Amino acid sequence: MKAIPSSEITPEEVYLSRRRFLKQALVFTGAVALAACAPQSVATNPPGDDGATATGSTDELGDRLTSYQDVTNYNNFYEFTTDKVAVARLSSSFISSPWQVQVGGLVESPKTFDLDDLRTRFDRQERITRLRCVEGWSMVIPWLAFPLRDLLNEVRPTADARYVRFESLYDPQQFPGQKDKWFNWPYVEGLTLAEAYNDLTLLATGLYGKDLLPQNGAPIRLVVPWKYGFKSIKSIVKIDLVAEQPTSLWMAAAPNEYGFYANVNPNVPHPRWSQASERRIGELGRRDTLLFNGYAEQVAELYRGLDLKANY
Ligand SMILES: Nc1nc2c(c(=O)[nH]1)N[C@H]1C(S)=C(S)[C@@H](COP(=O)(O)O)O[C@H]1N2
Ligand SMILES: [Mo]
Protein backbone atom coordinates (compact mmCIF):
# COMPACT_ATOMS: atom_id res chain seq x y z
CA MET A 1 0.00 0.00 0.00
CA LYS A 2 1.27 3.39 -0.95
CA ALA A 3 1.01 6.46 1.26
CA ILE A 4 -0.80 9.44 -0.22
CA PRO A 5 1.49 12.44 -0.14
CA SER A 6 0.01 15.26 1.94
CA SER A 7 0.94 17.69 -0.80
CA GLU A 8 -1.50 16.03 -3.15
CA ILE A 9 -4.51 18.24 -3.64
CA THR A 10 -7.83 16.47 -4.00
CA PRO A 11 -11.39 17.73 -3.78
CA GLU A 12 -12.91 16.89 -0.43
CA GLU A 13 -15.42 14.42 -1.87
CA VAL A 14 -12.74 12.42 -3.60
CA TYR A 15 -10.44 12.18 -0.65
CA LEU A 16 -13.20 11.32 1.77
CA SER A 17 -14.35 8.42 -0.37
CA ARG A 18 -10.77 7.33 -0.99
CA ARG A 19 -10.18 7.35 2.71
CA ARG A 20 -13.21 5.17 3.22
CA PHE A 21 -11.80 2.78 0.61
CA LEU A 22 -8.40 2.72 2.26
CA LYS A 23 -9.98 2.02 5.62
CA GLN A 24 -11.73 -1.02 4.14
CA ALA A 25 -8.53 -2.12 2.45
CA LEU A 26 -6.85 -2.07 5.83
CA VAL A 27 -9.55 -4.26 7.32
CA PHE A 28 -9.23 -6.81 4.49
CA THR A 29 -5.48 -7.01 4.32
CA GLY A 30 -5.20 -7.23 8.08
CA ALA A 31 -2.36 -7.03 10.51
CA VAL A 32 0.46 -8.17 8.21
CA ALA A 33 -0.10 -5.38 5.72
CA LEU A 34 -0.57 -3.00 8.61
CA ALA A 35 2.84 -3.82 10.01
CA ALA A 36 4.39 -3.68 6.56
CA CYS A 37 3.26 -0.19 5.77
CA ALA A 38 3.65 1.40 9.19
CA PRO A 39 4.33 4.18 9.91
CA GLN A 40 3.35 5.65 6.55
CA SER A 41 -0.03 3.97 6.07
CA VAL A 42 -3.43 5.54 6.58
CA ALA A 43 -4.37 6.49 10.10
CA THR A 44 -4.24 3.68 12.59
CA ASN A 45 -5.60 6.06 15.19
CA PRO A 46 -8.76 7.42 13.53
CA PRO A 47 -9.53 10.83 14.98
CA GLY A 48 -12.97 9.79 16.22
CA ASP A 49 -16.45 9.15 14.97
CA ASP A 50 -17.43 12.80 14.47
CA GLY A 51 -16.63 12.87 10.77
CA ALA A 52 -13.27 14.57 11.19
CA THR A 53 -10.91 13.22 8.55
CA ALA A 54 -7.45 13.66 7.14
CA THR A 55 -5.86 12.12 4.08
CA GLY A 56 -2.54 11.15 5.59
CA SER A 57 -1.84 9.72 8.99
CA THR A 58 1.65 11.09 9.54
CA ASP A 59 3.76 14.11 8.79
CA GLU A 60 6.76 13.92 6.43
CA LEU A 61 8.93 12.61 9.28
CA GLY A 62 6.57 9.69 9.88
CA ASP A 63 5.15 11.13 13.11
CA ARG A 64 1.52 10.26 13.76
CA LEU A 65 -1.22 12.86 13.69
CA THR A 66 -2.35 14.09 17.08
CA SER A 67 -5.95 12.94 17.66
CA TYR A 68 -8.79 15.31 16.79
CA GLN A 69 -9.87 15.02 20.42
CA ASP A 70 -6.53 16.37 21.67
CA VAL A 71 -6.17 19.04 18.97
CA THR A 72 -9.56 20.47 19.93
CA ASN A 73 -9.38 20.09 23.72
CA TYR A 74 -5.88 21.18 24.71
CA ASN A 75 -5.51 24.77 23.56
CA ASN A 76 -3.80 28.04 24.24
CA PHE A 77 -6.18 30.92 23.59
CA TYR A 78 -5.70 33.56 26.27
CA GLU A 79 -8.62 35.66 25.03
CA PHE A 80 -10.81 32.98 26.62
CA THR A 81 -8.73 31.64 29.48
CA THR A 82 -5.20 30.56 30.36
CA ASP A 83 -6.57 27.12 31.29
CA LYS A 84 -5.81 24.91 28.28
CA VAL A 85 -8.45 22.29 29.01
CA ALA A 86 -11.20 24.90 29.55
CA VAL A 87 -10.78 26.74 26.23
CA ALA A 88 -13.05 24.38 24.27
CA ARG A 89 -15.94 24.83 26.71
CA LEU A 90 -15.54 28.59 27.17
CA SER A 91 -15.30 29.22 23.43
CA SER A 92 -18.22 27.03 22.36
CA SER A 93 -20.60 29.95 21.72
CA PHE A 94 -18.03 32.19 20.01
CA ILE A 95 -19.56 33.88 16.95
CA SER A 96 -17.18 33.68 14.00
CA SER A 97 -19.62 34.39 11.18
CA PRO A 98 -19.97 36.81 9.49
CA TRP A 99 -16.26 37.64 9.57
CA GLN A 100 -14.03 39.96 7.62
CA VAL A 101 -10.29 40.23 7.26
CA GLN A 102 -8.99 43.67 6.36
CA VAL A 103 -5.71 43.57 4.42
CA GLY A 104 -3.89 46.86 3.98
CA GLY A 105 -0.97 49.06 4.93
CA LEU A 106 1.87 49.25 2.42
CA VAL A 107 0.07 47.54 -0.45
CA GLU A 108 -1.01 48.62 -3.90
CA SER A 109 -4.47 47.17 -3.61
CA PRO A 110 -5.92 47.04 -0.08
CA LYS A 111 -8.85 44.64 0.24
CA THR A 112 -11.37 43.53 2.80
CA PHE A 113 -12.17 39.86 2.40
CA ASP A 114 -15.31 38.16 3.62
CA LEU A 115 -14.53 34.79 4.97
CA ASP A 116 -16.48 33.12 2.17
CA ASP A 117 -14.32 35.10 -0.26
CA LEU A 118 -11.19 33.67 1.31
CA ARG A 119 -12.59 30.16 1.31
CA THR A 120 -13.51 30.24 -2.37
CA ARG A 121 -10.78 32.42 -3.86
CA PHE A 122 -7.88 30.50 -2.36
CA ASP A 123 -7.52 26.77 -2.77
CA ARG A 124 -7.64 25.02 0.58
CA GLN A 125 -5.12 22.22 0.72
CA GLU A 126 -4.48 19.67 3.41
CA ARG A 127 -1.14 20.55 5.00
CA ILE A 128 0.18 18.44 7.85
CA THR A 129 2.51 20.38 10.17
CA ARG A 130 4.01 20.11 13.61
CA LEU A 131 3.09 22.75 16.18
CA ARG A 132 5.61 23.25 18.99
CA CYS A 133 4.48 25.36 21.93
CA VAL A 134 7.10 27.37 23.78
CA GLU A 135 5.88 25.59 26.95
CA GLY A 136 7.45 22.33 25.75
CA TRP A 137 4.60 20.32 24.20
CA SER A 138 3.81 19.65 20.56
CA MET A 139 1.23 18.24 18.17
CA VAL A 140 0.97 17.13 14.53
CA ILE A 141 -2.04 18.74 12.87
CA PRO A 142 -3.64 18.25 9.41
CA TRP A 143 -4.71 21.78 8.50
CA LEU A 144 -6.97 22.93 5.69
CA ALA A 145 -5.04 25.95 4.60
CA PHE A 146 -3.63 28.10 1.82
CA PRO A 147 -0.26 29.82 1.63
CA LEU A 148 -0.22 33.36 3.04
CA ARG A 149 1.73 34.16 -0.12
CA ASP A 150 -1.43 33.75 -2.23
CA LEU A 151 -3.17 36.47 -0.24
CA LEU A 152 -0.16 38.81 -0.38
CA ASN A 153 0.01 38.40 -4.14
CA GLU A 154 -3.55 39.74 -4.39
CA VAL A 155 -2.85 42.94 -2.46
CA ARG A 156 0.70 43.45 -3.83
CA PRO A 157 3.03 44.80 -1.13
CA THR A 158 4.85 48.00 -2.11
CA ALA A 159 8.65 48.30 -2.14
CA ASP A 160 8.60 49.84 1.38
CA ALA A 161 6.87 46.86 2.97
CA ARG A 162 9.28 44.86 5.14
CA TYR A 163 7.06 43.13 7.69
CA VAL A 164 3.58 41.69 8.00
CA ARG A 165 1.57 42.56 11.10
CA PHE A 166 -1.39 40.41 12.16
CA GLU A 167 -4.14 41.33 14.59
CA SER A 168 -6.74 39.14 16.29
CA LEU A 169 -10.30 40.21 17.05
CA TYR A 170 -10.78 42.65 19.93
CA ASP A 171 -14.14 41.94 21.56
CA PRO A 172 -14.23 41.74 25.36
CA GLN A 173 -17.92 40.76 25.13
CA GLN A 174 -16.92 37.51 23.44
CA PHE A 175 -13.42 37.23 24.91
CA PRO A 176 -13.58 37.31 28.72
CA GLY A 177 -9.79 37.12 28.88
CA GLN A 178 -9.53 40.56 27.27
CA LYS A 179 -10.72 42.07 30.55
CA ASP A 180 -7.31 41.05 31.90
CA LYS A 181 -5.31 44.28 31.72
CA TRP A 182 -1.99 42.46 32.08
CA PHE A 183 -1.95 41.97 28.32
CA ASN A 184 -1.92 44.63 25.67
CA TRP A 185 -4.99 43.47 23.68
CA PRO A 186 -5.65 42.72 20.87
CA TYR A 187 -3.22 39.85 20.26
CA VAL A 188 -0.67 40.95 17.66
CA GLU A 189 2.00 38.99 15.80
CA GLY A 190 4.44 39.68 13.00
CA LEU A 191 6.68 38.14 10.36
CA THR A 192 9.34 39.46 8.02
CA LEU A 193 8.22 39.65 4.41
CA ALA A 194 10.52 36.75 3.48
CA GLU A 195 9.04 34.61 6.26
CA ALA A 196 5.55 35.53 5.11
CA TYR A 197 6.32 34.39 1.56
CA ASN A 198 7.78 31.04 2.63
CA ASP A 199 5.82 28.04 1.41
CA LEU A 200 5.34 26.77 4.98
CA THR A 201 3.55 29.92 6.12
CA LEU A 202 -0.17 29.20 6.01
CA LEU A 203 -3.54 30.72 6.68
CA ALA A 204 -5.70 27.91 8.01
CA THR A 205 -9.49 27.85 7.99
CA GLY A 206 -9.90 24.22 8.95
CA LEU A 207 -8.31 21.08 10.34
CA TYR A 208 -9.04 17.37 10.03
CA GLY A 209 -11.24 18.13 7.00
CA LYS A 210 -13.59 20.44 8.91
CA ASP A 211 -13.85 24.18 9.47
CA LEU A 212 -11.89 25.42 12.48
CA LEU A 213 -13.61 25.29 15.83
CA PRO A 214 -13.39 28.44 17.98
CA GLN A 215 -10.72 26.96 20.25
CA ASN A 216 -8.34 26.54 17.29
CA GLY A 217 -8.77 30.12 16.06
CA ALA A 218 -11.97 30.18 14.02
CA PRO A 219 -12.56 31.25 11.42
CA ILE A 220 -8.99 31.91 10.25
CA ARG A 221 -5.57 31.70 11.88
CA LEU A 222 -1.92 31.77 10.95
CA VAL A 223 0.30 28.66 10.98
CA VAL A 224 4.08 29.18 11.13
CA PRO A 225 5.35 25.68 11.86
CA TRP A 226 9.05 26.44 12.41
CA LYS A 227 8.34 29.02 15.11
CA TYR A 228 6.96 28.63 18.62
CA GLY A 229 3.18 28.22 18.64
CA PHE A 230 2.45 31.71 19.93
CA LYS A 231 3.44 33.13 16.53
CA SER A 232 0.50 31.23 14.98
CA ILE A 233 -2.06 33.91 15.78
CA LYS A 234 -5.74 32.96 15.93
CA SER A 235 -9.02 34.60 14.83
CA ILE A 236 -7.37 37.19 12.59
CA VAL A 237 -9.27 40.34 11.55
CA LYS A 238 -6.47 42.52 10.22
CA ILE A 239 -3.29 41.99 8.19
CA ASP A 240 -1.05 44.99 7.47
CA LEU A 241 2.13 45.35 5.47
CA VAL A 242 4.43 47.67 7.42
CA ALA A 243 7.92 49.12 7.32
CA GLU A 244 8.85 48.71 11.00
CA GLN A 245 9.13 45.49 12.97
CA PRO A 246 5.77 44.97 14.73
CA THR A 247 5.72 44.58 18.50
CA SER A 248 3.80 41.42 19.31
CA LEU A 249 1.62 40.95 22.37
CA TRP A 250 4.25 38.64 23.84
CA MET A 251 7.18 40.96 23.11
CA ALA A 252 5.33 43.63 25.12
CA ALA A 253 4.19 41.29 27.92
CA ALA A 254 7.44 39.37 28.46
CA PRO A 255 10.35 41.25 26.85
CA ASN A 256 12.89 39.08 28.70
CA GLU A 257 11.56 35.87 27.08
CA TYR A 258 11.40 35.47 23.31
CA GLY A 259 11.75 38.28 20.82
CA PHE A 260 10.42 38.82 17.34
CA TYR A 261 11.83 35.68 15.68
CA ALA A 262 10.87 32.96 18.17
CA ASN A 263 12.22 30.22 15.92
CA VAL A 264 12.11 26.78 17.52
CA ASN A 265 15.66 26.15 18.70
CA PRO A 266 16.71 23.40 21.14
CA ASN A 267 19.93 25.32 21.86
CA VAL A 268 18.29 28.50 23.10
CA PRO A 269 16.61 27.83 26.44
CA HIS A 270 13.68 29.80 27.77
CA PRO A 271 14.82 31.85 30.81
CA ARG A 272 13.02 29.32 33.03
CA TRP A 273 13.32 25.99 31.19
CA SER A 274 15.25 24.07 28.55
CA GLN A 275 13.90 23.79 25.01
CA ALA A 276 16.02 20.71 24.20
CA SER A 277 13.07 18.32 24.39
CA GLU A 278 9.29 18.28 24.20
CA ARG A 279 6.26 16.19 25.04
CA ARG A 280 4.28 15.14 21.98
CA ILE A 281 0.63 15.19 23.08
CA GLY A 282 -0.69 11.63 23.07
CA GLU A 283 2.74 10.05 23.59
CA LEU A 284 4.56 8.92 26.68
CA GLY A 285 7.97 10.33 27.48
CA ARG A 286 9.73 13.16 25.70
CA ARG A 287 11.41 13.54 22.34
CA ASP A 288 14.23 15.77 21.19
CA THR A 289 13.26 19.17 19.85
CA LEU A 290 14.57 19.79 16.33
CA LEU A 291 16.12 23.01 15.08
CA PHE A 292 13.41 25.04 13.32
CA ASN A 293 11.00 22.33 14.50
CA GLY A 294 12.38 19.98 11.83
CA TYR A 295 11.92 22.41 8.94
CA ALA A 296 15.55 23.61 8.63
CA GLU A 297 15.75 22.53 4.99
CA GLN A 298 12.94 24.91 4.05
CA VAL A 299 13.73 27.87 6.30
CA ALA A 300 17.38 27.97 7.41
CA GLU A 301 18.15 30.07 4.33
CA LEU A 302 15.95 32.85 5.74
CA TYR A 303 18.40 33.32 8.60
CA ARG A 304 21.73 32.97 6.82
CA GLY A 305 24.27 35.20 8.56
CA LEU A 306 21.99 35.79 11.54
CA ASP A 307 23.29 34.73 14.98
CA LEU A 308 20.44 32.48 16.12
CA LYS A 309 21.58 32.58 19.75
CA ALA A 310 21.43 36.38 19.82
CA ASN A 311 18.32 36.73 17.65
CA TYR A 312 15.68 34.51 19.21
N1 LIG B 1 -5.11 35.20 19.37
C1 LIG B 1 -4.38 34.23 19.93
N2 LIG B 1 -3.64 33.42 19.15
C2 LIG B 1 -2.89 32.42 19.70
C3 LIG B 1 -2.84 32.26 21.11
C4 LIG B 1 -3.64 33.13 21.91
O1 LIG B 1 -3.67 33.04 23.16
N3 LIG B 1 -4.39 34.09 21.28
N4 LIG B 1 -2.04 31.26 21.65
C5 LIG B 1 -0.92 30.81 20.83
C6 LIG B 1 -0.21 29.66 21.38
S1 LIG B 1 0.77 29.95 22.76
C7 LIG B 1 -0.23 28.44 20.80
S2 LIG B 1 0.73 27.17 21.36
C8 LIG B 1 -1.16 28.16 19.67
C9 LIG B 1 -2.05 26.99 20.04
O2 LIG B 1 -2.88 26.63 18.96
P1 LIG B 1 -3.93 25.43 19.14
O3 LIG B 1 -4.71 25.69 20.41
O4 LIG B 1 -4.78 25.47 17.92
O5 LIG B 1 -3.13 24.16 19.25
O6 LIG B 1 -1.98 29.29 19.34
C10 LIG B 1 -1.32 30.53 19.39
N5 LIG B 1 -2.19 31.57 18.88
MO1 LIG C 1 2.20 28.20 22.89
Image (cartoon, rainbow, N blue to C red):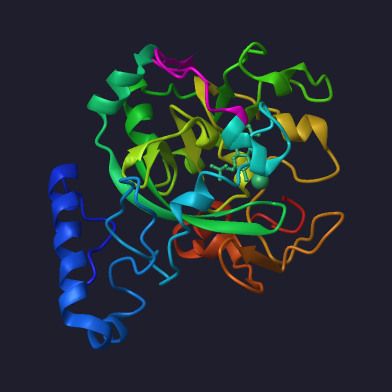
The structure residue drawn at horizontal position 73% and vertical position 66%, both measured from the top left corner, is 267
Q: Report if residue 92 is visible in the image.
A: yes
Name above or below for residue 177 compared with residue 60: above
Residue 147 is situated, as x and y percent measured from the top left of the image, at 36, 39
| Residue 222 belongs to magenta span | no
Name above or below for residue 62 compared with residue 201: below
Q: Which residues are magenta?
A: 90-109
Q: Quadrant of residue 97?
A: top left
Out of 96 and 122, give the one closest to the viewer. 96
Name above or below for residue 122 compared with residue 23: above
As drawn, is 97 to the left or to the right of 293? left
As drawn, is 1 to the left or to the right of 243? left
As drawn, is 249 to the left or to the right of 124? right
Q: Quadrant of residue 82?
A: top right
**Ligand 1 image position (quadrant):** top right
Q: Where does the N terminus fall, quadrant-wise?
A: bottom left
